[in-house]
Amino acid sequence: MISTHSGRSYSTRSHQIDGKYRVDFVMRCAGCGHEGSIHMDPNCAPALIVKKFVRLGWAANERNEKGCYCPACMKSEKPQMPVQAEMPKGPTLDQMKRIAEHVRGAFEPDAGHYLDGATDHTVGDKLGLPWGWVRQVREMLGYEIKIDPEVKAIRDELAALADMCIALERRLNALERKRAA
Protein backbone atom coordinates (compact mmCIF):
# COMPACT_ATOMS: atom_id res chain seq x y z
CA MET A 1 0.00 0.00 0.00
CA ILE A 2 1.39 3.40 -0.94
CA SER A 3 1.21 6.10 1.72
CA THR A 4 -0.80 9.18 0.84
CA HIS A 5 2.15 11.15 2.22
CA SER A 6 4.81 9.82 -0.15
CA GLY A 7 6.15 12.24 -2.75
CA ARG A 8 5.16 15.29 -0.67
CA SER A 9 7.21 18.31 0.33
CA TYR A 10 7.17 17.12 3.94
CA SER A 11 8.24 13.85 5.49
CA THR A 12 6.90 11.74 8.32
CA ARG A 13 8.92 11.02 11.41
CA SER A 14 7.88 8.37 13.91
CA HIS A 15 9.18 8.34 17.44
CA GLN A 16 8.25 6.78 20.76
CA ILE A 17 6.99 8.78 23.74
CA ASP A 18 6.15 6.95 26.98
CA GLY A 19 6.01 3.64 25.13
CA LYS A 20 3.58 4.91 22.47
CA TYR A 21 4.44 5.71 18.88
CA ARG A 22 3.73 9.17 17.54
CA VAL A 23 3.94 10.42 13.98
CA ASP A 24 5.03 13.98 13.25
CA PHE A 25 5.17 15.72 9.90
CA VAL A 26 8.44 17.54 9.20
CA MET A 27 9.05 20.26 6.62
CA ARG A 28 12.56 21.50 5.77
CA CYS A 29 13.13 25.10 4.70
CA ALA A 30 14.68 25.37 1.23
CA GLY A 31 16.31 28.67 2.26
CA CYS A 32 18.06 27.98 5.56
CA GLY A 33 17.50 24.25 6.17
CA HIS A 34 15.49 24.79 9.37
CA GLU A 35 13.06 21.97 10.13
CA GLY A 36 9.58 22.58 11.44
CA SER A 37 7.38 19.79 12.73
CA ILE A 38 3.72 19.39 13.56
CA HIS A 39 1.79 16.53 15.08
CA MET A 40 -1.41 15.52 13.32
CA ASP A 41 -3.35 12.32 12.72
CA PRO A 42 -1.31 10.14 10.31
CA ASN A 43 -4.45 9.53 8.25
CA CYS A 44 -5.24 13.19 7.58
CA ALA A 45 -5.18 14.57 4.07
CA PRO A 46 -1.90 16.00 2.75
CA ALA A 47 -3.62 19.32 1.98
CA LEU A 48 -4.48 19.72 5.69
CA ILE A 49 -0.87 19.24 6.69
CA VAL A 50 0.28 21.88 4.22
CA LYS A 51 -2.46 24.26 5.44
CA LYS A 52 -1.27 23.80 9.03
CA PHE A 53 2.31 24.71 8.04
CA VAL A 54 0.96 27.76 6.16
CA ARG A 55 -0.98 28.83 9.28
CA LEU A 56 2.30 28.62 11.18
CA GLY A 57 3.87 31.10 8.73
CA TRP A 58 5.50 28.73 6.26
CA ALA A 59 5.43 29.16 2.50
CA ALA A 60 4.54 25.60 1.65
CA ASN A 61 4.21 23.77 -1.62
CA GLU A 62 2.48 20.39 -1.28
CA ARG A 63 4.67 18.49 -3.75
CA ASN A 64 7.84 20.57 -4.17
CA GLU A 65 10.16 20.67 -1.18
CA LYS A 66 12.20 23.41 -2.89
CA GLY A 67 9.15 25.66 -2.61
CA CYS A 68 8.95 25.50 1.21
CA TYR A 69 10.30 28.33 3.38
CA CYS A 70 10.22 28.81 7.14
CA PRO A 71 8.68 31.91 8.75
CA ALA A 72 12.14 33.43 9.38
CA CYS A 73 13.08 33.23 5.69
CA MET A 74 9.69 34.63 4.75
CA LYS A 75 10.28 37.68 6.98
CA SER A 76 13.81 38.36 5.74
CA GLU A 77 14.34 41.22 3.28
CA LYS A 78 15.56 38.98 0.48
CA PRO A 79 14.44 35.40 0.90
CA GLN A 80 16.63 32.95 -0.99
CA MET A 81 13.79 31.59 -3.09
CA PRO A 82 14.79 29.97 -6.35
CA VAL A 83 12.84 30.67 -9.49
CA GLN A 84 10.44 27.78 -9.98
CA ALA A 85 9.48 26.34 -13.31
CA GLU A 86 5.84 26.77 -14.21
CA MET A 87 3.66 23.66 -13.88
CA PRO A 88 2.94 22.17 -17.30
CA LYS A 89 -0.57 22.84 -18.60
CA GLY A 90 -1.30 19.17 -19.22
CA PRO A 91 0.24 15.72 -19.21
CA THR A 92 2.82 14.67 -21.76
CA LEU A 93 2.07 11.79 -24.10
CA ASP A 94 4.13 9.43 -21.93
CA GLN A 95 2.28 10.54 -18.78
CA MET A 96 -1.06 10.10 -20.55
CA LYS A 97 -0.06 6.53 -21.49
CA ARG A 98 0.92 5.75 -17.88
CA ILE A 99 -2.35 7.20 -16.57
CA ALA A 100 -4.44 5.36 -19.17
CA GLU A 101 -2.72 2.05 -18.39
CA HIS A 102 -3.34 2.47 -14.67
CA VAL A 103 -6.94 3.63 -15.08
CA ARG A 104 -7.76 0.70 -17.39
CA GLY A 105 -6.60 -1.69 -14.68
CA ALA A 106 -8.39 0.06 -11.82
CA PHE A 107 -11.74 1.09 -13.37
CA GLU A 108 -14.86 -0.93 -14.18
CA PRO A 109 -16.30 0.95 -17.20
CA ASP A 110 -19.61 -0.94 -17.35
CA ALA A 111 -20.39 -0.33 -13.68
CA GLY A 112 -18.94 3.20 -13.78
CA HIS A 113 -16.67 3.08 -10.75
CA TYR A 114 -13.11 2.42 -9.65
CA LEU A 115 -12.23 -0.92 -8.10
CA ASP A 116 -10.95 -1.45 -4.55
CA GLY A 117 -11.69 2.10 -3.37
CA ALA A 118 -9.43 3.80 -5.90
CA THR A 119 -10.26 7.34 -7.06
CA ASP A 120 -8.79 9.88 -9.47
CA HIS A 121 -6.97 11.29 -6.43
CA THR A 122 -5.40 8.00 -5.35
CA VAL A 123 -4.34 7.17 -8.92
CA GLY A 124 -2.74 10.63 -9.22
CA ASP A 125 -0.95 10.18 -5.89
CA LYS A 126 0.31 6.74 -6.88
CA LEU A 127 1.68 8.03 -10.18
CA GLY A 128 2.92 11.32 -8.70
CA LEU A 129 0.74 13.34 -11.09
CA PRO A 130 -2.10 15.83 -10.55
CA TRP A 131 -5.45 14.11 -10.09
CA GLY A 132 -7.01 16.52 -12.60
CA TRP A 133 -4.86 14.94 -15.29
CA VAL A 134 -6.12 11.51 -14.23
CA ARG A 135 -9.72 12.73 -14.52
CA GLN A 136 -8.95 14.23 -17.94
CA VAL A 137 -7.45 10.97 -19.27
CA ARG A 138 -10.24 8.86 -17.71
CA GLU A 139 -12.82 11.02 -19.46
CA MET A 140 -10.85 10.78 -22.74
CA LEU A 141 -11.09 6.99 -22.40
CA GLY A 142 -14.87 7.37 -22.07
CA TYR A 143 -14.89 6.10 -18.48
CA GLU A 144 -17.66 7.96 -16.70
CA ILE A 145 -18.08 7.72 -12.95
CA LYS A 146 -21.65 6.57 -12.41
CA ILE A 147 -21.30 5.45 -8.80
CA ASP A 148 -19.39 7.37 -6.16
CA PRO A 149 -16.98 4.84 -4.54
CA GLU A 150 -17.79 6.10 -1.03
CA VAL A 151 -21.52 5.77 -1.66
CA LYS A 152 -20.97 2.27 -3.06
CA ALA A 153 -18.95 1.24 -0.01
CA ILE A 154 -21.66 2.50 2.35
CA ARG A 155 -24.38 0.74 0.35
CA ASP A 156 -22.37 -2.50 0.46
CA GLU A 157 -22.00 -2.14 4.24
CA LEU A 158 -25.74 -1.52 4.62
CA ALA A 159 -26.51 -4.63 2.56
CA ALA A 160 -24.15 -6.70 4.72
CA LEU A 161 -25.76 -5.32 7.88
CA ALA A 162 -29.23 -6.11 6.54
CA ASP A 163 -28.13 -9.70 5.87
CA MET A 164 -26.73 -9.93 9.40
CA CYS A 165 -30.01 -8.61 10.86
CA ILE A 166 -32.02 -11.21 8.95
CA ALA A 167 -29.70 -13.99 10.13
CA LEU A 168 -29.90 -12.79 13.75
CA GLU A 169 -33.68 -12.56 13.56
CA ARG A 170 -33.85 -16.16 12.28
CA ARG A 171 -31.59 -17.35 15.12
CA LEU A 172 -33.72 -15.47 17.66
CA ASN A 173 -36.97 -16.95 16.29
CA ALA A 174 -35.47 -20.46 16.34
CA LEU A 175 -34.28 -19.98 19.93
CA GLU A 176 -37.68 -18.69 21.05
CA ARG A 177 -39.45 -21.64 19.36
CA LYS A 178 -37.01 -24.05 21.01
CA ARG A 179 -37.59 -22.58 24.49
CA ALA A 180 -41.38 -22.41 24.03
CA ALA A 181 -41.55 -26.13 23.24
Image (tube, helix red, strand yellow):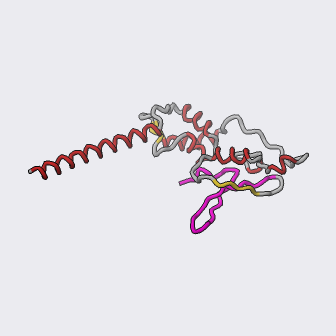
Residue in the picture at 48% in, 44% down: 117
Residue 7: x, y in percent? Answer: 65, 51
Residue 88 lies in the magenta stretch: no
Identify the residue at image location x=53%, y=33%: 141
Q: Residue furthest front?
A: 180
Residue sitting farthest toward the right: 77
Residue 9 is situated, as x and y percent measured from the top left of the image, at 70, 50
Q: Nearer the viewer, residue 136 or 120?
A: 120
Q: Is residue 27 left or right of residue 169?
A: right
Closest to the observer, 89 or 169:
169
**Residue 23 visible in the current orientation:** yes
Residue beneath the point at 13% across and 52% down: 179
Residue 26 screen position, x and y as percent: 70, 56
Would you say residue 94 is visible in this rendering?
Answer: no
- Residue drawn at (84%, 50%) of the image: 73
Residue occupying the far left of the picture: 181
Magenta stretch, residue numbers: 1-30
x and y percent of residue 106 in the render? 49, 43
Residue 20 among those drawn in magenta = yes
- Residue 38 lies left or right of residue 101; in this view the side is right
- Residue 167 higher or lower than 133, as above or below: below
Say above or below: 25 vs 121: below
Judged left or right of residue 38, residue 19 is left
Q: Of 155 and 38, which appears nearest the observer?
A: 38
- Residue sitting nearer the eye, 177 or 26: 177
Q: Is residue 107 above or below residue 10?
A: above
